Image (cartoon, rainbow, N blue to C red):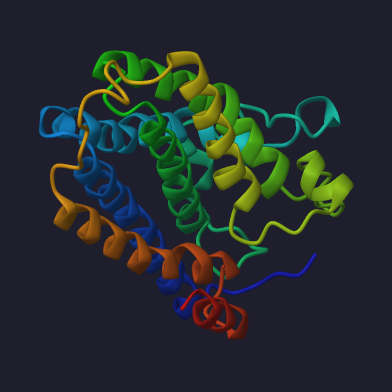
C-alpha cells in the first residue's frame, strides 16, 4: 500500500471541479426551463433545483456508502449503506490519496445530483413537483447509487475492499461517468416518457419554447461546468486532467 501526502494542487482542482459540476444543475434548470411553455417554467426549473437538496442530503446519509462502500456479499452490486453513513468516518484523510476523502465525496455528490436532474426533461409539463420529488428520492436510492457502485467503486486487494462488478469484472472504461450518468439517466428518461405518455394537446396545440435566451444561458453553463465534469475525473491536477480539458473543448 502506497502512502501519499496531501497535495494542495490536487485538492484545489477537485474542489473547483466539484463546484463546476454543481453549477451544471442550475444550468440544466435554465436549459430545460427555457424550452417549455411559460406556464410550466417554474415547475420545470424546480425539478432540477430540488435534486440538489434531496440528493445532496441522501448522499451524505447513505448514498456515498451505497456507491463506494465495501460491496455487500462481495457481489459488486451495492455498497454497504452503513459503512460511511453520515460521513463521520471520512473526516480524517485517506492515506492512499493525495486529496481529502471529503473532496472526493463532494465531487461525486455533484455527479449524483445532475444525473437525477437530467431525467426530468423527459416529463416536461407532465409531472407534479411533489411526484417528481418522490421519484428523485426513489430513483436516486434504488438506481443511481447502486449503478455508481458498479462503475466507480474499484476493488483494493490490499485492504480487502470489493468494488462494483462493471469496474472490476468487466473492467469497462468509464472515465467521466458515461455509463452511470448518461446511459443510466437516458434509459430512465425514455422509460419515464413511455410510462407518462405525450403532453395533452401534443401535435394539435402550439408548444413553442417560451424563452430561447434561457436555453442558451443554460447551454453555456453546462458547457462551462463540463470542464470540471471531465477534467476533474482525473482526480488530480496533472497531465490527464489537461488532456481531458482539451478534448472537452
Going 56% across and 45% down the picture, which residue do you hit? Answer: 181
Residue at 43%, 73% (x, y): give it.
13
Residue furthest to the left? 38
Where is residue 101 drawn, in percent x and y?
53, 55
Relative to 72, residue 162 above or below: below
Residue 161 visible, this angle: no
Q: Residue furthest front?
A: 204
Q: Toward the viewer: 230 or 94? A: 230
Q: Is residue 229 left or right of residue 97?
A: left
Which residue occupies 34% across, 59% down? Answer: 222
Quadrant (top left/top right/bottom left/bottom right) for the N terminus: bottom right
Q: Which of the pair 111/10 is nearer the observer?
A: 111
Q: Is residue 60 above or below residue 232?
A: above
- Residue 88 in percent (x, y) is at 47, 39
Question: What is the x, y in percent for residue 35?
Answer: 24, 43
Q: Nearer the viewer, residue 5 or 56?
A: 56
Q: Nearer the viewer, residue 43 or 123?
A: 123
Amino acid at each position: 500500500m502506497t502512502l501519499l501526502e496531501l497535495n494542495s494542487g490536487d485538492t484545489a482542482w477537485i474542489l473547483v471541479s466539484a463546484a463546476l459540476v454543481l453549477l451544471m444543475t442550475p444550468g440544466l434548470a435554465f436549459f430545460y426551463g427555457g424550452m417549455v411553455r411559460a406556464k410550466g417554467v417554474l415547475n420545470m426549473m424546480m425539478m432540477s433545483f430540488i435534486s440538489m437538496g434531496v440528493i445532496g442530503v441522501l448522499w451524505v446519509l447513505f448514498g456515498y456508502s451505497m456507491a463506494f462502500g465495501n460491496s455487500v456479499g462481495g457481489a459488486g452490486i451495492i455498497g454497504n449503506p452503513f459503512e460511511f453513513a453520515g460521513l463521520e468516518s471520512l473526516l480524517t484523510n485517506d492515506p492512499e490519496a493525495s486529496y481529502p476523502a471529503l473532496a472526493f465525496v463532494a465531487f461525486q455528490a455533484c455527479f449524483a445530483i445532475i444525473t437525477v436532474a437530467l431525467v426530468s426533461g423527459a416529463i416536461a409539463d407532465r409531472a407534479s413537483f411533489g411526484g417528481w420529488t418522490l421519484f428523485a428520492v426513489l430513483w436516486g436510492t434504488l438506481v443511481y447509487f447502486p449503478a455508481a457502485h458498479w462503475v466507480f467503486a474499484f476493488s483494493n486487494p490490499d485492504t480487502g475492499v470489493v468494488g462494483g462488478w462493471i469496474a472490476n469484472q468487466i473492467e469497462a472504461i468509464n472515465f467521466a461517468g458515461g455509463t452511470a450518468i448518461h446511459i443510466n439517466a437516458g434509459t430512465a428518461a425514455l422509460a419515464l416518457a413511455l410510462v407518462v405518455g405525450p403532453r395533452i394537446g401534443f401535435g394539435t396545440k402550439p408548444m413553442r419554447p417560451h424563452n430561447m435566451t434561457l436555453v442558451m444561458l443554460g447551454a453555456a453553463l453546462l458547457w462551462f461546468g463540463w470542464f470540471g465534469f471531465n477534467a476533474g475525473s482525473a482526480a488530480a491536477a496533472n497531465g490527464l486532467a489537461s488532456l481531458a480539458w482539451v478534448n472537452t473543448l
